[in-house]
Image (tube, grey):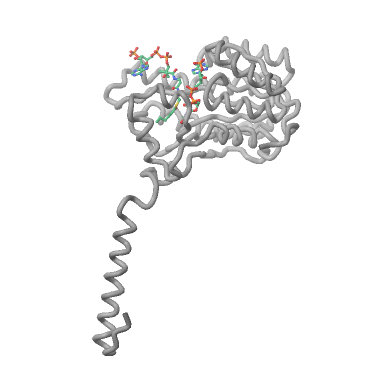
Amino acid sequence: MFAPDLLKGSICVVTGAGTGLGRAAALELARGGAIVVGCGRREEPLAETVASIEDGGGTAVALELDIRESDAVNEVVDRVLADHGRIDTLVNNAGGQFALPAEYITPNGFRTVLELNVLGTWLMTHAVATKAMIPQGGGKILNVTLSPHDGFPGLVHSSAARAAVENMTKTLSVEWARFGIRLNALAAGHFDTDALATRYVPGVKEDALTRVPAGRWGTVEEWGWLVTYLASPAGDYFSGSVLTLDGARDVFGAGSYPPAGLLEAVEEAAIATRQHRNDIRFVTTGVDRK
Ligand SMILES: CCC/C=C/C(=O)SCCNC(=O)CCNC(=O)[C@H](O)C(C)(C)COP(=O)([O-])OP(=O)([O-])OC[C@H]1O[C@@H](n2cnc3c(N)ncnc32)[C@H](O)[C@@H]1OP(=O)([O-])[O-]
Ligand SMILES: NC(=O)C1=CN([C@@H]2O[C@H](COP(=O)(O)OP(=O)(O)OC[C@H]3O[C@@H](n4cnc5c(N)ncnc54)[C@H](OP(=O)(O)O)[C@@H]3O)[C@@H](O)[C@H]2O)C=CC1
């Protein structure tokens, strides 16, 4: 999609790079010439992402990391700086939740989702900003969040967490503009990743698709293009924004338009209206203009 030297020499850290959207972002950034540092808890999927990038002629390394662990986050950022000298883009992609009616969510379940999405994103953001981006004079941070924005039944913990991340993104885009740091949130709609298929009870995935006006899942490639565009010079003036990639899921949320039967009803109403107008004309002029 992009020129192969678009991001040449750029150092991009992607959390959750072993699977799904993070993997797709890592692959596309590497295709653009970036050196990708992929992080996550499990070694195996990260190694697979690195191998795919290397097979395509790109450069990547994998570092195991739980983003909720402050000391580990600091160590990983120090390691990247020791090896590469700078960090140009951080993609805070690692995140997630489980779907459950709110009344069943335990205090620890709620805390767990908040810690992963809010605290984890904050720890990565703070470490990369203070250790790399402020000293080097700038950088970009892309925080993955969630569409729909105005409440997601079954995901009360994650809806709250993603709203917090979007507000954090906006606040820091003002505070850290003086350091040349640009932050944006990327709200994902429904993407057909393995996680969406395997982590939810049957029906959640299928129900999600009925709410997408575009009538299809997003593809992971489309996600990778958005991330890469924003990481590139074309994205330099974006900051403090929430970019929603969701096939209009956020706009209305009730699926494709028109709903079943609507067009037929409109046509019937139009015929009735025409008939009514003709009846009026006939009465007033005596001419039937059918
Ligand atoms: C349509 C959807 C749109 C969105 C799509 C996507 O985002 S796709 C991307 C999707 N990808 C992802 O989401 C990937 C990332 N997600 C994850 O790693 C996990 O979902 C996580 C966020 C829960 C963290 O896991 P962890 O290993 O750190 O947590 P833990 O096991 O130690 O449990 C801690 C507490 O949470 C509770 N609990 C946990 N699971 C469930 C459940 N299914 N049910 C009920 N409760 C659950 C558990 O009971 C415990 O509370 P308790 O019993 O002590 O009171
Ligand atoms: N797919 C979709 O339709 C949507 C996705 N999203 C969001 O997009 C992001 C990617 O989703 P997707 O690719 O589908 O899902 P995945 O579950 O495949 O991706 C989550 C990634 O985050 C990593 N991760 C999870 N917890 C941690 C942790 N504590 N520390 C470090 N890494 C962690 C996982 O790797 P590991 O387990 O090895 O640590 C995994 O690679 C998530 O934030 C998700 O919530 C939002 C809306 C919709």
Residue 175, position as x, y percentages in the image: 60, 32
- Res. 208 image quadrant: top left
Q: Residue at position x 59%, y 26% from top?
A: 91
Q: Residue at position x 42%, y 45% from top?
A: 213
Q: Residue furthest bottom?
A: 285
Question: Where on the image, by quarter, is ligand 1?
Answer: top left
Q: Is residue 174 visible?
A: no
- Pick the residue in front: 171 or 187: 187
| 156 to the left or right of 171 | left
Whether 190 is drawn above or below 279: the answer is: above
- Res. 223 image quadrant: top right
Q: Residue at position x 69%, y 26% from top?
A: 88
| 273 to the left or right of 17 | left
- Pick the residue in front: 179 or 22: 22
- Res. 183 image quadrant: top right
Q: How many marks?
A: 0
Residue 34, position as x, y percentages in the image: 70, 26
Q: Is residue 279 visible?
A: yes
Quarter of the figure that contains the C terminus: bottom left
- Pick the residue in front: 125 or 144: 144
- Pick the residue in front: 259 or 65: 259
Residue 273, position as x, y percentages in the image: 29, 71
Quarter of the figure that contains the N terminus: top right
